[in-house]
Image (spheres, rainbow, N blue to C red):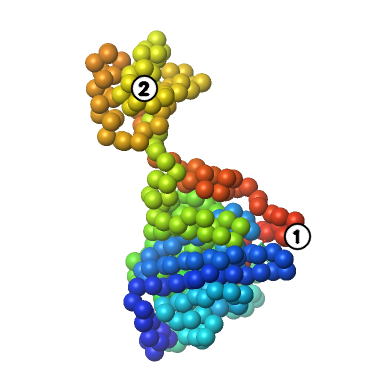
Amino acid sequence: MEYKNVKKPNNGDWAVEANGLVKVFGDNKAVDGVNLNVKAGTIYGVLGPNGAGKTTTIRMLATLLRPDAGSARIFGHDVQKESQIVRQLIGVTGQYASVDESLSATENLIIFSRLLGLGRAEARKKAADLLEEFGLTEAAKRPLKNFSGGMRRRLDLAASLIAQPPLIFLDEPTTGLDPRTRAQMWDTIRRLVNTGSTVLLTTQYLDEADQLADRIAVIDRGHVVAEGTVDELKQSVGTSSLHLRVQNPSDIQIAQHTVEHVLQVQATLTSEAAKITAPMANADLVTDLLIALREKGITLSEVSVQKPTLDEVFLTITGHGVEEKTQEAGTETKRAEAVNV
Ligand SMILES: Nc1ncnc2c1ncn2[C@@H]1O[C@H](COP(=O)(O)OP(=O)(O)OP(=O)(O)O)[C@@H](O)[C@H]1O
Ligand SMILES: [Mg+2]
């Protein structure tokens, strides 16, 4: 389609290279020197609480907002000096779906397909297929203005599948969606990447980043405070933890001593009946521990080794939870919205 004439990756590997991006609104440094590198063909998650600067960063990368400092390249093309080329390489959810609010979902998708150069029959088929895939067939004839938030979000993503640009920005694609629709969105996002696109998505949901993203940047107050694969970020927070429960509560003391002896750490008895937790740096030691417990005749009812959750990662890195608002004086309260570019 359109992208044929644009030399896509003249730098090979990088879909996004952002260096020291800054955006100041009044006296609010919304984005304060963000560096971001996204490999082509991957899903990259930008994670952060309300007001962290996620949308502002995306808007700069998508040529919708001029950076006050720093620079960014999309497939090697400068977002400021080559904004026309960049625009042909990207899709931003929210830009396209609603060509006309009074027209139906089908009509909107057909118009959009035609604008992208598809023939009449092809456009009709594409629209029907996408509406079916996104569970919107029943609502296909309804005018867009009667769509719910979740339906609109799905239609948005459907529209971005028609063009399927090389790089797609999804700003909180699943905020407020029901679990089933959310899972559907995740599948679609994976499909986009499997068929050659690169996706940069923002989210406040740690599990979403965990599920989808090859790499993650955690943004807090305009700064990237951590970057890496999900596993790297989890590891940076420290060790996994061991949880075990003994079948016979009278074994609890001796079990605790055994854990402490084998793992060489302090084990904690939780208030829950007969449960022991301990930090576990080396998961291999679990075998030694199980053997030692068996030799002492202790029967376990439950044992698990858990990696730290991304929630814990976030808390450790930023010093506050992901749900907590970081509004400072003078900053507006922001809605959690999916399409806020
Ligand atoms: N157009 C604007 N004018 C003034 N201030 C703005 C503007 N856009 C964003 N801000 C401020 O910049 C900061 C970062 O906002 P941004 O929308 O980038 O955050 P976000 O990480 O996307 O948050 P959310 O999770 O709520 O979408 C906030 O303090 C916000 O109030
Ligand atoms: Mg936002």
Percent x, y for residue 158? 48, 70
Please tell me in which quarter of the rendered image ligand 1 is found.
Answer: bottom right
In the rendered structure, find residue 314 and report the number of the disc placed on it.
Answer: none
Instruction: Please rate how many residues cluster around mark 1, counting C-alpha atoms within 10 Å: few if below 14, some from 14 to 19, many from 20.
Output: few
Q: Is residue 17 above or below residue 275?
A: below
Q: Is residue 197 or residue 308 the one in the foreground?
A: 308
Q: What is the x, y in percent for residue 164?
A: 43, 75
**How would you rate the neighbour count of disc 2 (Cα within 10 Å): few for under 14, some for 14-19, many for 20 or more?**
some
215 over 6 or under it: above or below:
above
Amino acid type at image mark 2: Glu
Q: Position of residue 275 (x, y in %)?
A: 43, 22
- Relative side of 45 to 328, left or right: left
230, 248: nearer the viewer: 230
Residue 308 visible (yes or no): yes
Residue at 59%, 45% in the rendered image: 320
Q: Is residue 29 above or below residue 87?
A: above
Going from N to C along the chain, the mark reached first, 1 or 2, is: 2
Element on which disc 2 rests:
helix
Q: Nearer the viewer, residue 335 or 101?
A: 335
Task: Please tell me the numbered disc located at residue 260.
Answer: 2
Quadrant housing the N terminus: bottom left
Return the residue found at the far right. 330
Residue name at image x 41 percent, y 28 percent: 278
Task: Pick the quarter of the image with the C terminus.
Answer: bottom right
Q: Amino acid at mark 1?
A: Gly
Residue 188 visible in the shown view: no
Q: Quadrant of residue 336?
A: bottom right
Q: Residue at x 49, y 63 (%)?
A: 201
Q: CA distance from mark 1 to mark 2?
A: 51 Å
What residue does disc 1 label?
Answer: 330
| Count of numbered circles in the view | 2
Could you tell whether 76 is left or right of 67 in the image? left
